[in-house]
Every structure is written in structure tokens, then in C-alpha cells.
Image (spheres, helix red, strand yellow):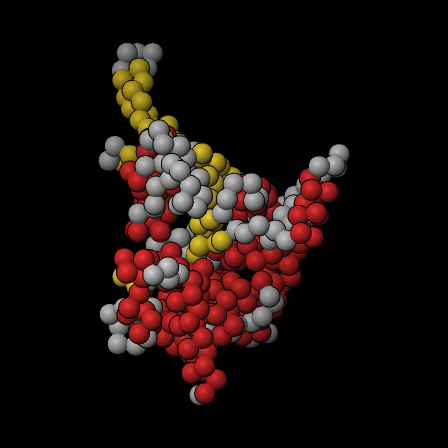
Amino acid sequence: MDKAEDLVAEIEALGDKLARARAMVAKRIIGQETVVEQVMAAMLAGGHALLIGLPGLGKTRLVETLSTVMGISGGRIQFTPDLMPADILGSEVLEEAADGSRSFRFIPGPIFCQLLLADEINRASPRTQSALLQAMQERAVTVAGHEHAMEKPFHVLATQNPLEQEGTYPLPEAQLDRFLLQVDVEYPDRDAERDIILATTGSDEAEAQAVFSTDDLLAAQALLRRMPVGEGIVEMILDLVRACRPDDDSAPDTVRDAVAWGPGPRAAQALMLLTRARALMDGRLAPSAEDVRALARPVLIHRMALTYGARARGEQLGGIIDGVVESLSLGEAAA
């Protein structure tokens, strides 16, 4: 069997395993198939996800379930206005030995886990929010001049309440860019809500079981980066990201008139990884244009900002992104 056949066999085997993992998650997370798909894609891509929705929609339950199913250790930080960076990262304490000598010892904070639930992240001050920056990008934290490595893999799944709620702070742009994608958690439809109340209020409730292990997840993340991506998909990703920058020559008038700043190169990197992950979960051997279209809004929306005038006119970033995607799709069809 040559290398290409080996790769195909590995991708197919991983696709089957991912299908079992999604079925296990679906036992506890009802009616949120798109949310589950996007969060699992972020984990397969080795990145972080920002979940936005009102309280009580199952965001915390999803993170706890994924921790079990993917076989990694989970941790949780409840963000509050009085939370300090040391409460997240840990701190050094002065200890005195039996012989009277003194030395500093680092006590790790709750960030030292493999899947961190940053619950209601936008209730803490920007200073505390930014304590996650180094860990999210470099998988390490620096305390008192000493760097401490995180265990691999390391993922942050942050939940955020809508900014219109009282007592919330917007996340810094630099931190938003560290999230591979933004996942919007909506209310379930009537049938799904009926299933939820029946499944969660009885005497027996479905329990999650591990499908992956830490080594399995790391191997899956490595395999994802070996998945081939066609040249047409690469060009579509570049066209999409660059068309969302108001100062780019390819930007349409809707972007130039309404967008203050657009996505950077991390957006293109995120799309490259996430389209592969979506293809893997669908059991396909390579990403398609449909993967790019499906992921455009969640990847780009938190990496862009409207101008004051556009906000005053009531324009929405989601609609602008959808318009850019549609124009690219029409161009693709014409070609």
C-alpha cells in the first residue's frame, strides 16, 4: 500500500471514529447539530472556539460532554468582574523548608488542563480576559518571569453572553482573533425542546463515554494537516478573506462602505484548517467549496468590525459576509 492509499485509509478510519463521537455527544446535546459540528471542528483543527448565546442553552453541558467524549481533562473558570489574572494562571508562593531556607513555588491555576471552559468570559475585565492570550497562542504561560508549558492538546471553549446584557465587556480584538471561529448558539426548535425536557427531567439521563483518548486526538490533529486541499479551494479562501478587507482592491462596495477593519491572515489559516475538519467529519477525503461557504460566517464575523455609520444604519456583519460569499459563488459558477 503506497502513501496515498495509507492516507485515504487513515482518513476513512478517523471519519468513522468521529461519527461515533458525534453520536455520543448527540445523546446529551439535543437539537444543536451545527453547534456540535463547529466546536468539534475547532478541536480537530487544534484551536479554540467562542460560543455566544443566552444563558441556559446548553453551552456548559456541551463543553463537559466533549471533555469526556474526546478523552481529555477538563477545567472550568467562571469569569466574574472581580476575577484577577492570577486566579486563572496561578501564582508563586514563598515556602519555608524545615531547615529554614525559603524558596518560591509555582502553584498552577485552573488554566492548566486540556479543555478549558471559560464560562461567561466577557463578564471579567479586559485585563483579566487578556490573561488567556499567551496560553491560547503559545500553549504556555509566564508568571514572575518563568515560562510554564501547557499540557497538549490545549483548547479554550469560551462562552459569552450577548453584549447587550448588563455587566459585560467586549473582548479585546487580539483575543478574538485567537478563536478559530465564533459559534452562535440559538434557541432550539419546538420538537428539539420537547426532546430536551423529556431527556433531562426523568430518572435516567444519558451519560457520555470516551470515544477518543488524548493520543487519538493528537493523532487526528496531525492527520488533518496532511489532508490535501485543492488549488481552487485555496484560491477561494484567499478571495473570500481579502474581499472582506475594506482597503483591498478586491473588496466590494458593501465592504468598503460598512466595514472598519477586516480579517487578517489568521482567518485564512482558520478556514484552511476548519474546512479540512468539516470534510473529515462528513467522511470526505478533501474539503469542498461548500465547506468554505458554510464556515465563512463563523470564521470571519468576530474578525471584522462595522463603521459607526453602518451601525447607525442597522447593518449586520453576517449579511455583509453572506453577500461576499454569494458573489464569490456566482463567480465560481460562471467560471
Q: Is 26 positioned to the left or the right of 115 in the image? A: right
Q: Is 294 positioned to the left or the right of 104 in the image? A: right
| In-front residue for pair 132/247 | 247
Residue occupying the far bottom of the picture? 335
Count of labels in the image = 0
Query: Residue 232: horizontal and vertical position, in percent?
Result: 43, 79
Query: Residue 1: horizontal and vertical position, in percent?
Result: 59, 74
Query: Residue 47: horizontal and vertical position, in percent?
Result: 43, 53
Identified at 54% across, 44% down, the residue is 59
The answer, for residue 277, to whether it is visible in the render is yes
| In-front residue for pair 316/62 | 316
User: Image quadrant for the C terminus?
Assistant: bottom left
| In-front residue for pair 81/115 | 81
The answer, for residue 63, to whether it is visible in the render is no
User: In terms of image quadrants, where is residue 133?
Assistant: top left
Identified at 42% across, 77% down, the residue is 327
Query: Residue 186: horizontal and vertical position, in percent?
Result: 54, 52
Identified at 28% across, 11% down, the residue is 100
Identified at 34% across, 41% down, the residue is 169
Can you say whether 268 is above or below 326 in the image? Answer: above
User: In terms of image quadrants, where is residue 147?
Assistant: top left
| In-front residue for pair 102/71 | 71
Can you say whether 126 is above or below 300 in the image? Answer: above
Residue occupying the far front of the picture? 313
